[in-house]
Image: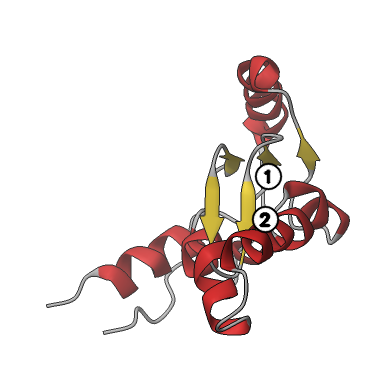
Amino acid sequence: PNRHPKLLFAYAEATVPKVTVITRKAYGGAYDVMSSKHLRGDFNYAWPAAEIAVMGAKGAVEIIFRGGDVEKETLNYTEKFANPLLAAQRGFVDDIIDPAETRVRICEDLELLRSKDLGEVSRKHSNVPL
């Protein structure tokens, strides 16, 4: 039996602090399930070299620019769409942080979220997808 839907459901419904740091690549559904803002993540950060997009640049370019200069268009696509600045502007990432400050930021966030309280949850246990 496929346990992925149950795991995703449990992760999305968790009421514990959720802090995410995108260090490298976050594409499509994988980005969504890594405690993104869409799944009520509390804090989401990205390193400057992170790539956040619907799909990888090479795959997207091969679909969009068939027969064109794939290498050139891949660089253009990455620069335009797969960088963390665009995700931060759209509110998907709270901040772009230097890798050296990652530990400090996570510790500060966990301290802030220590008393996280979502109030009275109307249904602590919802219907799990089967």
Residue at 67% x, 55% y is 75
Q: Which mark is residue 61?
A: none
Percent across and percent down for residue 11 are 44, 58
| The N terminus sits in image quarter | bottom left
Residue at 59% x, 63% y is 39
Mark 1 lies on residue: 44
Identify the image quadrant of residue 72. Answer: bottom right
Percent across and percent down for residue 92 are 74, 57
Percent across and percent down for residue 26 are 54, 54
Mark 2 lies on residue: 75
Residue 84's place in the image compared with 112, above or below, is: below
Residue at 53% x, 68% y is 28
Say which amino acid is labelled 1: Asn
Please give left or right for residue 35 compared with residue 82 in the image. left
Q: Earlier in the sequence, mark 1 or mark 2?
A: 1
Secondary structure beneath label 2: helix
Residue 40 is at least partly visible in this image: no
